Structures are given as structure tokens and as C-alpha cells.
Amino acid sequence: MSIYSCRTDAGWLGFLSQDTPLGSAAADFAYDIPTALGFVIGSVVTGLGLYLLVAGIFEYLYYRRQREHSEAWKCQPQRFPTQRMWSIDLWLGITNITLGSVLSGFLAYWIYASGHSRIYISLRGHSILEVVVGTVLYFLITDVVIYWAHRIFHRPALFRLIHRWHHRNTVPTAFTAFSLHPVEFLTYQSIMLLPLIFVPLPAIGVIIVLLSSHIESLIQHSGVRIFPVIPWMPSTYFHDDHHRYFHVNYGQHLILWDRIFGSLRRHGRRYGVEVFGGKGAPLTAAAGEPTRFIDYSRRSPLRLSPDTPIGPLGSRAPAGAGRAALDAAGPAADSAAG
Ligand SMILES: [Zn+2]
Ligand SMILES: [Zn+2]
């Protein structure tokens, strides 16, 4: 087994200053390439395997076997993505997951081999309370940061430049979950992984959060009606509506942040690709500020209220810009009636 010593100040971990304890540890770090490859391959196989397995199960059980009975199971029963949109989602997802898994596999190897990350693998010397609190805080803090990162990606310029890649599909399937501009995918990946370098966290808790987050993203995009078994989780209508109504429901896992920051979809508001800001627009000039949020926790199919239409996309859209964004996002071109 060959071992290659390498000063990391020339590598991607070179941002760690040599004056800090982490920096000097990184400088003495020696690469063991076969082991590093093992971590990277393991990470790619896990990431891609989970993606293809979970998305494949939804595809087989619902989209292939029960396509004719979509009224019984689908969030948007009359609409399906086109074959072209489905392929774009699949291959962009595979590309992003491979890229992200190579980076996270290498980071996991560095954490394991250098022994100087703040993450702890053995629980010896750590109380149960410390492990649980560390895991819960990691989950909550990364979830609220991702909420805000996603919300910022919905600002008009960033939406048109980057985030519209993810919103091309207005009838998402599980294959849409990682169909993102690579810049956006790496942003979320960094939010999840950077704390592992600097914050003392239990490795087991981090693995549970990362895997459950991966699976939850697939479920939320599935387009299949699934109602929460965990009280603080929304039904799949929550993120399906995000793709249908665009600038609303920004949360990744928890509905809490949208409630607190006022971006949960409401009754009596108009939404659409041209209605930026997360709070919809009044249905009429005289309409007051609405207060009632849609209830995404109820265990019944969500009826699309006539008071929350998408659009209209003509006269009331802001001049030029909103319509251009819609054309770029191309929802009409990329979805088809079932
Ligand atoms: Zn979005
Ligand atoms: Zn999405």
C-alpha cells in the first residue's frame, strides 16, 4: 500500500490557515490513496444507489404500474413530465450526485485519516445528551440555512440565472430532487458539510441526518401523495406546490421556517413564476393582507382551491421580466397532460 505525503496548502483544504491547529494538522496529513478511493467509491455508490433505488421504486410502483389511476395517488393527477424532462432530471441528478459524492467521500476520508476534524467517531467520553443535542442542532441549523439559501436563489436575478434549472419541471418526480444547477447543488452540499470541519459533532448523528435528508428530498419530489408520520414534517403537497406555484414553500424538511418567515402558501393569494417574494400577490387591488396558511399536515388530498390560481401570466405580470422567466423555465413545454 503506497502512502503519499502531501502538504495541503496547495490543495483544496489549503484555506485552513497554517497558524491554526486545524491548519497545522492538515499540513502533516498524509494521503493513503487506496483508502481514499475506497471512501470516494463508497460515497458515490451510496449516493447514487439510494437515489436510483428510491426514485426507481416510486417510478415502478406508481408511474408505471398505476399511471391510469393517477387520481388515486398523484398530487397533480392530470399532469406528468414529458419524456425529455424526465431524462434531463435523471441525467442531471446523476451528474450532481456523482460530483457531490466524490467531494463528500474525500472529505469523509480526510476526517477519518487526519483525525483532526472536530467530528467524533467514537462515542466514548460523550454523553447521550451531547450526542442527541449535537445531532438535533446540526439538523435544525443546516435546515434553516438551506431554507434561506433556497429563498435567496428565488430572487429574480439568481432565479433566472441558476435556480430555474430546478423549476423547469412543474410536475416533479423523485428524479427531479437533484436536478439542479451544479452551483446550487454545491452550495447546499457545502452548507451540510462545512460544519463537519469546524463544529464538534457525532459522526453517527451526521450520517443519520445526511441519509435521511437525501431520502426526504426524494420523497418530497415524488409527486405521490404521502402524508406525514412525523408530526413536524409536511405532506408531499408541500414541495409539489413549490414546483407548481414557484415562489412559495421554500423549506427543505421542516414547514416551520416558512411559517415563521411568512412564505408558506396561503389561501386567497395568486402565485406564479412572475410573482416573486414568497408571499404571493393579491387577487384584486382591493384585497387585504391574508392570514390563513394552507394546512399541509392534514391527512387528506389537498383540494386546489379556486382562490389560489397560478398566474395569470398576461396583463398583470410585471412588464417583461416575469414573462421572460416563465419562457426560460418553460413549464408548459416540459409537462404534459396525463
Ligand atoms: Zn425553488
Ligand atoms: Zn424541488
Image: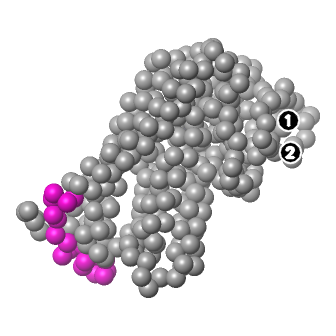
152 or 256, which is in the foreground? 256
The reply to whether dot 2 and dot 1 touch (C-beta < 8 Å) is yes
Q: What stretch is highlighted in magenta?
A: 17-36
Q: Earlier in the sequence, mark 2 or mark 1?
A: 1
Residue 118 located within the stretch drawn in magenta: no
Furthest toward the left, the residue is 2
Q: Quadrant of residue 72?
A: top right
Q: Residue at x 37, y 48 (%)?
A: 46
Question: What amino acid type is highlighted by mark number 1?
Answer: Gly
| Residue at the (32%, 45%) spot, across then down | 45
Confirm whether the magenta stretch covers residue 20.
yes
Q: Position of residue 8 (x, y in %)?
A: 20, 67
> Which secondary structure lies at badge 1?
loop
Mark 1 — residue?
268
Q: Is mark 1 within 8 Å of ligand 1?
A: no
Q: Give the structural element (helix, strand or loop) at label 2.
A: loop
Quarter of the picture containing the N terminus is bottom left
Establish if 313 lies above or below 277.
above
Three-letter amino acid code at the position of disc 2:
Arg
Residue 177's disc number: none
Q: Residue 292 carries which label?
A: 2
- Residue 160 visible in the displayed image: no
* 3D distance between C-alphas at marks 2 and 1: 8 Å
Q: Residue at x 18, y 76 (%)?
A: 28
x and y percentages locating residue 248 in the rendered image: 68, 41
The answer to whether residue 89 is seen in the rendering is: yes
Give the tally of numbered discs. 2
Residue 219 x %, y %: 57, 40
Give the crowd class for mark 1: few <14, some 14-19, many >=20 residues within 10 Å: many
